[in-house]
Amino acid sequence: MKSPIDTTTKGDQLVATLAALANPHRMRIVAALAGGGRNYVSQLARELGISRPLLHLHLQKLQEAGLVTSKLELSQDGKALNYFEVIDFALHLTPAAVAEAAKTLTAKPET
């Protein structure tokens, strides 16, 4: 079951979610995890054709927005592997939903 992003009470969460998804690398990461299931950083970096440090940066942003989760596991040969997986989510955006979310914003607009 998809967990909906609550646009009626969590304006800051909506902003974080949209900001996280506004980057093409992060959209590709979500797509790769959604299509292929959980994966560890090195393998995911190879599949996406980006460096591990860049992937870590984007995974951190996605994790902060609540879109992915990670779990550290040991491989059979004793190596620590950090597995990431996408959290099932759904966004239903309408002008009314955005207006309601805007009422709950705590972040001040940048000037």
Image (cartoon, helix red, strand yellow):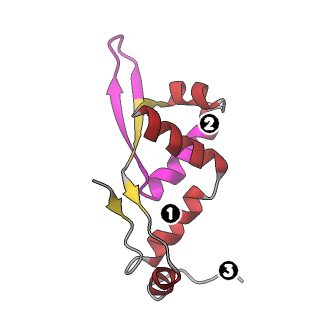
Q: Which residue has dot 2 on it?
A: 53
Residue drawn at x 44%, y 85% is 104
Q: Residue furthest left?
A: 1
Residue 108: x and y in percent read 58, 84
Q: Are marks 3 and 1 in contact (CB under 8 Å)?
A: no
Q: Residues within 10 Å of mark 3 (few under 14, many from 20)?
A: few
Q: Residue furthest right?
A: 111
Q: Which quadrant of the structure image shows residue 22?
A: bottom right
Of tags 2 and 1, the one toward the viewer is 1
Type of amino acid at the residue the image marks with label 2: Pro
Type of amino acid at the residue the image marks with label 3: Glu
Q: CA distance from mark 2 to mark 1?
A: 22 Å
Q: CA distance from mark 2 to mark 3?
A: 28 Å
User: Residue 82 in magenta?
Assistant: no
Which of the two residues, 78 or 104, is positioned nearer the viewer here? 104
Task: Describe the element under mark 2 as helix, strand or loop.
Answer: helix
* Sequence-first disc among 2 and 1: 1
Q: Which residue has dot 1 on it?
A: 17
The reply, left or right, for residue 20 in relation to residue 51 is left
Which of the two residues, 53 or 2, is positioned nearer the viewer here? 2
Task: Describe the element under mark 3 as helix, strand or loop.
Answer: loop
Q: Residue furthest bottom?
A: 103
Q: Which quadrant of the structure image shows residue 86?
A: top left
Residue 39: x and y in percent read 43, 30
* Sequence-first disc among 2 and 3: 2
Q: Which residue has dot 3 on it?
A: 110
Type of amino acid at the residue the image marks with label 1: Thr
Residue drawn at x 44%, y 69% is 92
Residue drawn at x 48%, y 70% is 14
Residue 41: x and y in percent read 50, 31
The magenta segment: 55-81
